[in-house]
Image (cartoon, helix red, strand yellow):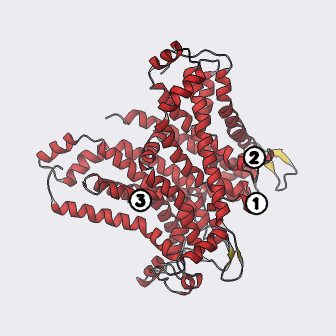
Amino acid sequence: MEKRVRFKSRWLPWLLIAPQLSIVLVFFFWPAGQALYQSVLQEDAFGASREFVGLENFSRLWNDSGYLDSFKTTAVFSLLVAVTGLSVSLLLAVMADRVGRGAGLYKTLLIWPYAVAPVVAGVLWLFMFASPMGVVGYALRAMGIEWNHLLNPNHAMALIVMAAVWKQISYNFLFFLAGLQSIPKSLIEAAAIDGASPWRRFWTIVFPLLSPTTFFLLVINIVYAFFDTFAIVDATTHGGPGKDTAILVYKVYYDGFKALDMGSSAAQSVVLMVIVVSLTVLQFKFVEKKVQY
Amino acid sequence: MIERRPGLQILRHVILLIGVAIVAFPLYLTLVGSTQTAQQINQSVPMSMVPGSHFWETYRLTLFGGTNSQGSPLPAMWPMMQVSLISALGIAIGKIAISLLSAFAIVYFRFPLRNMVFWMIFVTLMLPVEVRISPTYEVVAGLGLLNSFAGLTVPLIASATATFLFRQFFLTIPDELVEAARMDGAGPMRFFKDVLLPLSATNIAALFVIQFIYGWNQYLWPLLVTTNEDMYPVVLGIKRLISGESWTEWNVVMAAAILAMLPPALVVVLMQKWFVKGLVDTEK
């Protein structure tokens, strides 16, 4: 789409665009280029020498069982976050869509966790499960579950999944609610007249019509679990026990800033960039194809 | 309402109430924790779920610092909240300002390389700062911006969400307005100030809410570029409080958590309409 009427000036547009363009060049293209460049270099920890090693950093990653494990951890984590988060929010949104009076109040009470910083979400959930005073951990022990997220990798994973889902419910809820409200009431009324039960109406009419929203949220949640949950991991488990909750972003940070292996960290950054770009492209393709119904 | 089923209606309320309770429970526990003493929390198994009587004490200690129950120093959160506020405002206002200008240039002018410039900005949508932390850190360190507000904010301003949004919005503004402005002898900047800005007010408000929360909650980036406690935002301060080896002053941690979530949560609840609009617009 283009404007028919424009202003004419040789220098003004450049002046207007200069602030953003310079920031993008300095803080985006330069670092991205650096990441690509560093990913083919081998540098010692003190930065004294560097040599060109080609794709060795990548092949080292490929053969590094720790990195592949981190990939698996991230996949499990983001899948759990996306599936749990979407199911809970969809349930709540379907209920809120038809509840009538009080819907606004429920909405307000459900959306505020969006404002909570991931690190705060992590601390809040840690507090509920911390030993010995955490009330939820205590309740679980009373029921015979020996809760210990410091030693048990499954418990550690469950803890970060819960904190991550809790923070993301509000976002999913709002989008599901908007999606539900855009479904024509006449379709549901017609099905009701034909005698379809609410359960059946949901699965044969509402859920299929909601699929663009669901798909969009699925991608958003995976991206969220990949990148925005660093603070949750850093606040609760530090990637432990061992490396069992070290998701990819945590590993980039750890290898680059704690273990000072810049070459490997840069190669990991490049892999992450490829993942984000492909997720974004996938999303654009699907959204364009499927959003019209 | 399609049919009346009282049973179903009750079920809806029950499920929603359970949802609200699960969402609110961590908050309640945090509030309770911040009103007890560290000993009360650490020495009871489990901690009491009834609010204690040490509200003012804990919050004074958290805001202004002091010594904890073990005699070690505690950092003050008040200066950190100021750092958070300044950088959140800087990120939100900076992003909106540069995006308005560049969207205006892209939509209302024709100049060489216009499409390339647009794509250069647009491609930044795809890569969040988390993905390119170490190289961006090196650039910022090389420019001598560590431990400064510029280092905390400017690299996070480099994103195209807002530019893209304003571009889409400007494209929907009728051309007649430009023609009328030109006939009245208004130059481009006059048109920008007197026509585009007022028309964009709701978009600006919506974006502001989202970007303020984004800026306030930044964690990984400040963790890298600040080493000086004077420049810690409050979310980093919380991390500092729980990384003590042996003893965690939980009441102070909980009070700090409340203080850290209060400003953005208030923004969401009080500006709910714009918040929802901003959320939907930025993700389109």
- Name the residue carrying label 2: B140
SS at mark 1 in the image: loop
Q: Sequence order check: which comes first, mark 2 or mark 1?
A: 2
Residue type (three-letter) at the residue carrying disc 2: Val
Q: Residues within 10 Å of mark 3 (few under 14, many from 20)?
A: some
Q: Residues within 10 Å of mark 1 (few under 14, many from 20)?
A: few
Q: Nearer the viewer, residue A253 or A128?
A: A128
Q: Label 2 vs label 1: CA separation?
A: 15 Å
Residue B5: percent from the left, percent from the top?
A: 15, 58
- How many discs mark residues in the rendered view? 3
Q: State whether discs 2 and 3 lie on one chain.
A: no
* Residue B274 seen: yes
Q: Residues within 10 Å of mark 2 (few under 14, many from 20)?
A: many
Q: Label 2 vs label 3: CA separation?
A: 38 Å
Relative horizontal placement of residue A252, taking residue A191 as reference (left or right): right
- Name the residue carrying label 3: A84
- Name the residue carrying label 1: B228
Residue B29: percent from the left, percent from the top?
A: 47, 73
Residue B64: percent from the left, percent from the top?
A: 66, 69
- Residue lying at 36% horizontally and 55% vertically, measured from the top left: A107
Task: Tell me the chain of label 1.
Answer: B
SS at mark 3 in the image: helix
Kindly indicate the quadrant of the structure image that contains residue A84: bottom left
Q: Nearer the viewer, residue B47 or A199?
A: B47
Q: Nearer the viewer, residue B182 or A35?
A: B182
* Residue found at the far front of this picture: B184
